[in-house]
Image (spheres, rainbow, N blue to C red):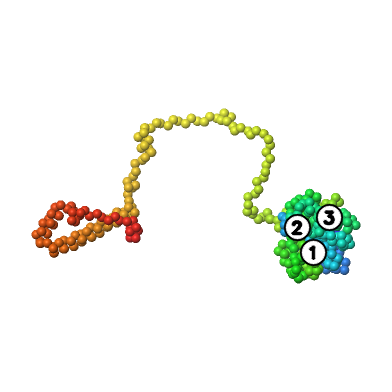
Amino acid sequence: MIGSGIGVRTRSWIVPCLRISLGISLGICLGMLAAPIAGTPAAAAADCPGHPDALGTSRTVVVDPREHPRIGTMQYRETLPLRDHEVVLTFDDGPLPKYSNQVLQILANECIKATFFIVGRQAQANPEGVRKLVAAGHTVGTHSQNHPLTFEKMPVEKAKAEIDGGIASTTAALSDPSALAPFFRIPGLLRAQGVEDLLASRGIQVWSADFPADDWRHVSGERVHQLAMQRLEAKGKGILLLHDIQPRTVAALPKIIHDLKARGYRIVHVVPATADRPATPTEPTEWLLHPQSESVPVARWPKIPNFVFAQGEPLPAPALADLNAELPRQPALPRRSAGEADAAALPVPGRDVFEIPEKSLAVLLTTSSRRGATRTASAETGHRSHAVARGKARTPARSHGRQHAHAAHTAPKGTTGGTAAKPRPTRLASLKKR
């Protein structure tokens, strides 16, 4: 299959390659054969009779559900190991003949293989639709028996009944029960840990998606087409979630496929691994939607590994005798008297310790105190002169002279009327204003 697909691509490029001028080497020509030009549709993996411009299916990926039990970055860390510009188409809730048959025909015209998640009740009502899917080469998984939107809160036993019922109904519709893939998608993507653990224990892979197209909502087919392409362009690759029971999906699907071809996207088909069909070799990083490059620095500390230490007694630390060495003896320090110790501990301060630099706080305080005392003395002198002038007007000159002479003998310097002049204290706040 893959070889024939490569042959189709080679035939489409061999004639223009042979017409290349002689100035271009053969290596460049072969490189053109190996990779399509960006923006052109990818080559189909198989011939599509009657539809030479079909999108086709570029390759098939075989997965082991036990190695990767949960996929789809809408809810889980891992997704399918897809390359850039690769898409997996998935359809839920069918089969419903009115619309599912139209979806099946659109895919057949483009030779596209997809994955369908069947509701058991729908399989019971339309078993022929399930067999058509298998006959067309699509992958068939299950989607519960009745599609209840309560998986996140129902008891595990009830969820188990829904899962088993859907598997039983879908298997009964198939001519070959082994054609049923161990793939399951939880209705409404309403995941629950107990349900996921149950499915993983039975080797059933839980499928979420990487982006939906909202075709279950009351929107137009054009809006479904726009959402599908916008979200695909944002992701670059991934699993697209659609529903084959909706008329808007039937209207949007041809436009989605047209844009996939125009923008260089490729379709990938996914099948489960079997004893005769081993899983496709992959690296762990391929299961991440956008794996981190080794050239990008990691802005976190690496995880410390958990070591399992062997049982045993710890080794003792080596003693000094084991080193065959002796520590040198330290000479005894001379004894000192109390006076010598104090002298050594408290050296005599130098003269510069007591020097007060100019414009320091102490100088300002002293200067301000002197200025304040001078102003106080001037005020007291003025007050005394005023009092003397009034005394002269009231008493004769002789009496005033005796009183003045007596005051001169008894009062000390700097006093008036026998009372010592007390200078007003200078406040620090006034110094700051000056």
Quadrant of the rendering where the C terminus is positioned: bottom left
- Crowd class of label 1 (few under 14; some 14 to 19; many from 20; radius 10 Å): many
What secondary structure is marked by label 1? strand
Q: Amino acid at mark 3?
A: Gly
State if disc 1 and disc 3 touch (CB < 8 Å): no
How far apart marks 2 and 3 lie (CA) works out to: 16 Å
**Numbered label attached to residue 150:** 2
Question: On the rendered structure, is 168 left or right of 430?
Answer: right
Mark 2 vs 3, N-terminal side: 2
What secondary structure is marked by label 3? helix
Give the label, 2 or 1, closer to the camera: 2
Quadrant of the rendering where the N terminus is positioned: bottom right
In the rendered image, which quarter is residue 369 located in?
A: bottom left
**Where residue 15 sits in the image (x, y, percent)?**
83, 68
Residue at 86% from the left image edge and 60% from the top image edge: 123
99 shown above or below 208? below
- Crowd class of label 2 (few under 14; some 14 to 19; many from 20; radius 10 Å): some
Q: Amino acid at mark 2?
A: Thr
How far apart marks 3 and 1 lie (CA) works out to: 21 Å
Give the label, 3 or 1, closer to the camera: 3
Mark 3 vs 1, N-terminal side: 3
Residue at 17% from the left image edge and 53% from the top image edge: 411
Mark 2 vs 1, N-terminal side: 2
**Where residue 262 sits in the image (x, y, percent)?**
77, 68
State if disc 3 and disc 2 touch (CB < 8 Å): no
Residue hosting label 1: 243
**Where residue 322 sits in the image (x, y, percent)?**
58, 29
Residue hosting label 3: 165
Residue at 57% from the left image edge and 28% from the top image edge: 321
How far apart marks 2 and 1 lie (CA) works out to: 19 Å
